[in-house]
Amino acid sequence: MTGLIILLCILLIFVIVVQIGKVSEIAGKIRGDQEIEVDGNRINGAISIIFMVLFLVGCVVSAIYYEDSMLGYGPHVAASEHGVGLDRIFNVTLFFTGIVFILTQIALFYFAWKFQGRPGKKAMFISHDNKLEVIWTIIPAVVMTFLVVGGLDAWNDVMADVTEGEDYMEIEATGQQFAWTIRYPGEDGLIGTKNYTLINPNNPLGMDWSDEKNHDDMVSTGAGEIMKLPVNKKVRVRITSRDVLHNFDMPHFRIKMDAVPGLPTYFVFTPTVTTEEYRAGLGATDKNGDPLYPEWWEPSDEEDPESPMRWEAFQYELACAELCGNGHYSMRRVFEIVSQEEFDVWAASQQSYYLTTIRNTDEDPFKGRLLDVEIKSRGKEFKNRLETALASEAIEDKTLRFDYVNFNTGSAVLTPDSRYELENLVAAMSDYPNMTVELAGHTDNVGGADGNQVLSQNRAVAVMNFLAGKGISSSRMTAVGYGPSVPVESNDTEEGRAANRRTEFKIINQ
């Protein structure tokens, strides 16, 4: 019904305009075309002045009204080191072009009124004016020179790549319809190589698993995951695309760079404002406690009045600034800028894509071999477990299982890879010179009880001999074989028996 009423109103306006035209035509014939033309010129001239005033006032008023919503103004200060320079050159450019804009608009509409057609008036023809030509050539040239030089200086600063020996971290963003895949380096700080021919459902980036730099890289494909970056740390972003043209856009950091298929690009920036600091700016209040920016004190969910305020729910975001397809709107990733300490904790909690998805599958070129990245990961895991045990006062927490100490089947001969975890214990006992331990061997109930008892004792002794060979005093260790007498699972299943076949150490003194 509303649509029909609107359509009828538009039709009525059209009819009125047509009728006014017909009335004007009749009036012109009655009064004479010249008089009508003079009246029309006078009316149009007056309308031009009125429009000029309303137009310029509207421009200024709307700019003031929306100031707090525009990047670079109000609470939306640049959150990156280079962004400050970009905002500065933008404001300088806006100042000079604003002057030209206002003067040209005034001249345009003033001339329409000043030089309206009048009876007896004739236009003056001026073929050339050297002075005028010099003025409107030199002044713009000088202004443009300063703007171009300032712009080039800002461009060179913003687009500079990192230099050798510079402290920075590198991440990778790959655009595809319709998501961003983010890759972080592991402890080595290096992003591994990739090849598009290796792309498959298990390897969305085409990472080359023969390159060991890929083994500790973390890959995030989930749009709901929140990525983190450390504040005041230079970040170099590798930007690539898997399919069509995308655009890596982080407006609060003044970052915008195309992601071009087959042509990797990059952007280097240093975030200077944490997410919490930016939120505090949006939610700032005056000395009376009133919000400086009331629009940010509205519920973030319009349908839930109890939802956090908009400033509390604010997040930095990565978007795509190209119309890359119907699902373009969904290319949104959230980034949090945090302290270096918080970032380090977060980064340590992230898992390697290779170790969690590819390791020991048919795609793994190192299947069956222990890798350096695994040795380091197991070392961290062992250290964390030991520190937890030392901090605990519960007796049951003082016993730790060797997860990666194994023996040849039916013997007390350690497998070669077992030495890595035992060396972790050697390092721990060196760090804690007062620590003494009991080394315990356990078996399942398959076979004779006496044989299992002997086997468990021999395995405990084998571990003790390894530690002694690394310089740990025998006075700090005892070796005990428990056979099948202390099971942790039922021996009725293969899984239970496997759990019962174990080697442990118990902290006696620390």
Image: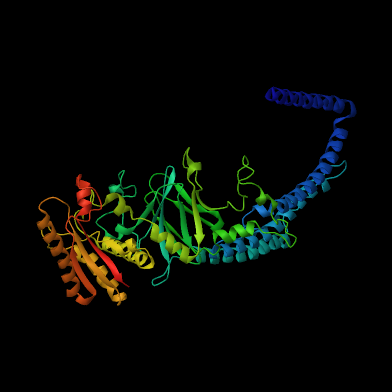
Q: Is residue 266 visible?
A: yes
Q: Nearer the viewer, residue 29 or 473?
A: 473
Q: Quadrant of the N terminus?
A: top right
Asked if residue 129 lies left or right of residue 89, the reply is right
Judged left or right of residue 18, residue 119 is: right
29 above or below 39?
Answer: above
Query: In the figure, is residue 446 to the left or right of 431?
Result: left
**Residue placed most toward the observer, 141 or 80:** 80
**Quadrant the C terminus occupies:** bottom left
Q: Nearer the viewer, residue 316 or 101?
A: 316
| Res. 192 in view | no
Residue 177 locus on image (x, y percent): 42, 42
- Quadrant of the rendered image containing residue 507: bottom left
Q: Quadrant of residue 410?
A: bottom left
Q: Is residue 426 above or below residue 408?
A: below
* Residue in the image at 43% along x and 67% along y: 168
Coordinates of residue 237 in the picture (x, y in percent) = 43, 58
How is the model colour-coded? rainbow
User: Which one is in front, 125 or 510?
Assistant: 510
The image position of residue 327, as x and y in percent, is: 47, 39
- Expressed as whole percent of the image width and height from the top left, the position of residue 316 reads 53, 54
